[in-house]
Image (spheres, rainbow, N blue to C red):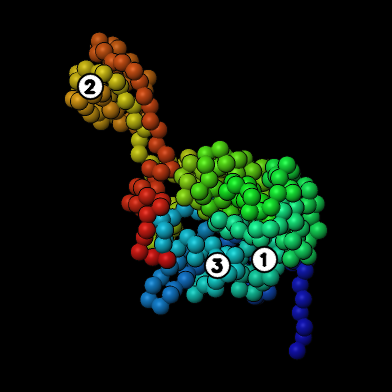
Amino acid sequence: MTSWSVDSHVLRDDIENFKIGKSILKEHSCWGIYLSNNVAIEVQQLTKRYGELVAVNGISFTLNRGEIFAFLGPNGAGKTTTVEILECLRKPTGGKAFVLGFDIGKNPREIKKRTGVLPQDFYTFERLTVRETVQYYAGMFDAHPDVDELIRLVDLEDKKNVLFRNLSGGLKQRLGIAVALVNDPELIFLDEPSAGLDPKARHGVWHLIDGLHKKGKTVFLTTHYMEEAEVLADRVGIIHYGKIVALDSPQSLISENGKRNLLILKKTSPQAVPNIEKLGLKANYDVTTGDVTVHLNHTVGVSEVLHSLSSTGVPFGELQLKRSSLEDVFLNLTGVSLGEEEDNV
């Protein structure tokens, strides 16, 4: 039997120079090499079943190199199962997935060498210092990172000789990110990196993640904080009952699936309501507060409303504008809040 070997760079050159046909590409795919340089993850009809329960139901999506991708879903929607399949911790029932050019079913070792993982609530040896912890995990990967540079990157220089057990929750998460970087990964999986942290510590973690993004790292983020996804992510995927129900940039999702922005006119005459409705907008008067709530749309904005009221002599007080958010999108698409349970895995 003839023994075959293939160099991925040579294969790409062959395809570029000689335009190899689809049948040959299909044959080459059996070697576990995915051919796009721009895609960090490609998922094709991925499925995971536990008996009769379908935890992941034929989902497909891509993650581009160099982007932050936020993966959202209610508890039990299939989010964790999907991520664990991509991390090569679980085997799918069906479908295909490629991570950094490698088939998860055929090249798990190659994938693990090139990825970093921060589990939720990172925990390690209590009596190791920050520096000793980073050194320990670097040894596990047979990696030779600049330990002091990693510690500086996560802003733990003044804590490098502090025992893990004496660190705050936020500092432990920062250390966990340093550990996830010891093998200089191309792709980093961050599972709830700021869960349970106070606002100051949470924003510190956000700053760190943004710094990884600026260094060209690809980040796969799972989070229960909608603001975190909205601030950090280039694109957001929402999974519901094992299926992807939305996938786009945060702003595009808000524009297409969120509630309309609300304009609140404080202490306003009820005469404002029919005036505003002539503009084709929905308005409601609260007899208790004297406020009028206006549901804005893409064609009529705040300036048109204020001009209409002023021109007809309708008085109004303070203005408040509430914009739609990713939270509105999530509720609209799933019917539950992010922390609620769903009857799935």
Q: CA distance from mark 1 to mark 3?
A: 12 Å
- Tag of residue 111: 1
Q: In the image, is residue 91 above or below residue 330?
A: below
Q: Identify the residue at image location x=67%, y=72%.
A: 107
Residue kind at label 1, given as amino acid type: Ile
Residue kind at label 2, given as amino acid type: Gly
Residue highlighted by disc 3: 85
Residue highlighted by disc 2: 290
What x and y, as percent, mark residue 170?
59, 46
Left or right of residue 69, residue 179 in this image? right
Residue kind at label 3, given as amino acid type: Ile
Q: Identify the residue at image location x=26%, y=18%.
A: 267
Q: Are marks 3 and 2 in contact (CB under 8 Å)?
A: no
Would you call the spot at circle 2 few (<14 residues within 10 Å), some (14-19), or many (20 or more)? some
Q: Nearer the viewer, mark 3 or mark 2?
A: 2
Quadrant, the C terminus: bottom left
Question: Looking at the image, is mark 1 or mark 2 earlier in the sequence?
Answer: 1
Q: Nearer the viewer, residue 108 or 198?
A: 198
Quadrant, the N terminus: bottom right
Q: Identify the residue at image location x=60%, y=44%.
A: 205
Q: Nearer the viewer, residue 64 or 28?
A: 64
